[in-house]
Image: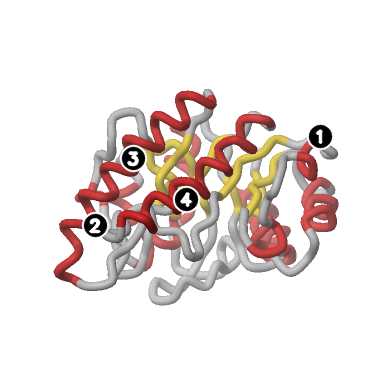
Amino acid sequence: MYGISTYALQTLPLPEALDRISELTRYAEIMDEGCHFLKSSEPLQSYDLRYTIHAPSRGVNIASTLEPIRKASLGVIEDCFAIASEVDADVVVHPGYFAWETEKKPAQRQFCRSLEELSAMAGERSIRYYIENMAWEYFLLLTPDELPLLDGVDLALDVGHAQIMGCLPAFLKQQIGHFHLHDNDGRSDTHLAVGSGTIDFTAVMEAVGASGLDPVIEVGSIEGAIESLIVLEQMS
């Protein structure tokens, strides 16, 4: 089964987005931002869907060298964990970033502290969370060299981000807990439909198949999501 991220319908109210997605699949990933920001689990419980939740990331930085910001970011994600626990959803979290190159090592230390705290929160809620690889030089977790993370914390492999960083084949060899599928030209994070860019999805889907996981299509439009479903189903 393939999931579809509400990112494809980010300008619609969440119920309308879930109506559209439920016509295509029984698995939705909630982009917990903007008009899809979750104040409670109530909007999700109205649907017979399986969920994962992409935790808020805009304005959130779990690697911040400013401790009040790091703690506030953890608070936002803890709220997301609480909602996830009510709908039995896994959660995807961004690793955080640094403002200046001289802050990279301190940010890495803050990131490690945050992972320990997030793991404790997740354990209390009996949920799983994954850390997503990124594609911008001021973020952490750009390449497989930064793995492994904290014991028990798996990677959410964003294949588009890995393609931009030129290390998708190396990432596919890692322990992966979650997949985000979208395409690009290897330069820009355009979230194109699968098959519309330069990614070798044969290799990607071999890794997905070996993992036994259900990947999430994270493209920029519902038309792109439908196109991706067609391409992926033809590959299976």
Disc 2 and disc 1 in contact, CB within 8 angstroms: no
Query: x and y percent of residue 204 in the render?
Result: 45, 48
* Local crowd size for mark 4, using a 10 Å CA cut-off: few (<14), some (14–19), many (≥20): few
Which residue is the site of mark 1? 48
- Is 226 placed above or below 130 here? below
Disc 1 to disc 4, how far (Cα)? 31 Å
Tell which circle, 2 or 1, labels the residue nearer the N-terminal end: 1
* Outermost residue, front side: 68
Disc 2 to disc 4, how far (Cα)? 36 Å
Instruction: Tell me the mark number nearer the camera, choosing from 2 and 4.
Output: 2
Which residue is the site of mark 4? 202
Which residue is the site of mark 2? 107
Query: x and y percent of residue 157 in the render?
Result: 42, 48
Residue in the image at 28% along x and 71% along y: 99
- Is residue 28 visible in this depiction of the protein? yes
Which residue is the site of mark 3? 115
* Local crowd size for mark 1, using a 10 Å CA cut-off: few (<14), some (14–19), many (≥20): few
- Is 59 placed above or below 119 here? below
Image-quadrant location for residue 17:
bottom right
